[in-house]
Image (cartoon, rainbow, N blue to C red):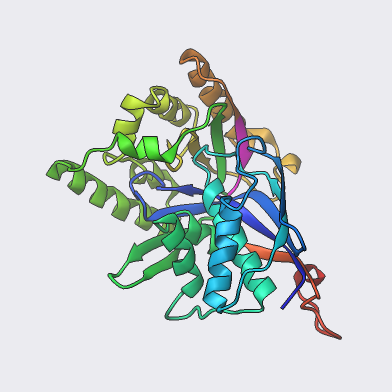
Amino acid sequence: ERRRVTVRVPATSANFGPGFDCIGMALDMWSEVTVERSETFSMVCEGEGADDVPLDETNLVVAGMREAFRAAGKDMPTCSYHCINRIPYARGLGSSSAAIVAGLLAGLVLAGHKLRCWGTEELLNLAANIEGHPDNVAPALYGGIQIGIHNGQRWLTERVNLPPGLQVVCFIPSQIGKTSEARGVLPDEYPKRSAVFNIGRVAWLVNALAMNNIDNLRYGTQDQIHQPYRGAEKYPYLQPMIDDALRAGANAAYLSGAGPTVLAITTGASGDIFAQREKERVDMQVADAMLRAAEKHGVQGQAFITEPVASGAHVVSAEPSFSKGLVTYRGSV
């Protein structure tokens, strides 16, 4: 068991266009949570959504902690929590999944309990059972691009190839978007043509990623299951912004998660982009196009440029440390 732990968890972009509730990608945008055993409960949140997230035991970080100690067969101790939220709250970038995963990972470390991975993926299943689907929690845990399914007994996920040099341009609206409302506009049944359309697009998407064929992402991220309905009912700027991003040079664009964020994919990045000539990339042109589209529709927000990340949630520090003697873990954890 340990007294104190700090963990970091990445933002995630779910659905990836046609992969509704099953495909997601981790982004280089990290929230950090420190949990310490304490005589009294306390929670401090700073950064994104600090005025909106609950500061009591209904917080999803605590929910993850509770599930971790349940899995360990131990009573959850009273703890203090310090959350530094860098993932925009309720914007379709996986803030809730990040909180769940942070709580689970911190809880397992404090409890001194380890789970089986190969053939069982126990941690994934704990997280997906809380969240209800794997498209955010899988990349939050493992990084990269993940495809998650349920086989009738448990959740499974597999990593998909992440082509090199990708950047993402996120238009993040100022207003929040509630997932429950975004799901509420979706129909209970779909026409066969929409099902066939999405089956083909998901296959096209995975093949494009596997073959590093970035140009084919334009078609692989098209969707008829959720984006048309959410665009019509909640986000009228969605399709015009996607079209403008593509015209500006983006390889693909789609609604991130349940929205309201729109994510565009660009290429050409090499090393640190601030040491690279801008004319070799189109991220700024795409960001400007997305901001102009937002302005036309009276939507306030900002553009955030980052990149996919291959790694997922990890421990930053722990007391006592995991490093011993001549064996040191990354970051001297």
Is 253 positioned to the left or the right of 10 in the image? left
Does residue 203 appear in this view? Answer: yes
* Residue shown at 55% from the left, 36% from the top: 170
Q: Is residue 306 magenta?
A: yes
Residue 157 at what x, y percent from top left? 42, 66
* Residue 4 vertical position relative to residue 245 in the rendered view, above or below: below
Q: Residue at x 65, y 45 (%)?
A: 55
Residue 109 versus residue 171 in the image, above or below: below
Q: Is residue 144 left or right of residue 80?
A: left
Depth check, front residue: 173 or 238: 173
Asked if residue 30 is positioned above or below residue 139 in the image, the reply reads above
* Quarter of the image where one finds residue 109: bottom right
Q: Residue furthest front?
A: 40
Judge whether residue 34 can be spotted in this image: no
Q: Position of residue 198 (x, y in %)?
A: 26, 47
Question: Is 207 positioned to the left or the right of 102 in the image?
Answer: left
- Considering the whole magenta stretch, tell me its main secondary structure: strand
Q: Is residue 19 above or below residue 117?
A: above
Looking at the rendered image, the quarter that the N terminus falls into is: bottom right
Q: Residue furthest left?
A: 192
**Viewer-closest of 49 and 111:** 111
Location of residue 62 (image quadrant): bottom right
Residue at image point 29% right, 70% down = 151
Region in magenta? 303-307
Q: Residue at left 44%, top 68%?
A: 125
Depth check, front residue: 258 or 143: 258
Indicate the position of residue 195 as horizontal and vertical percent values.
19, 47
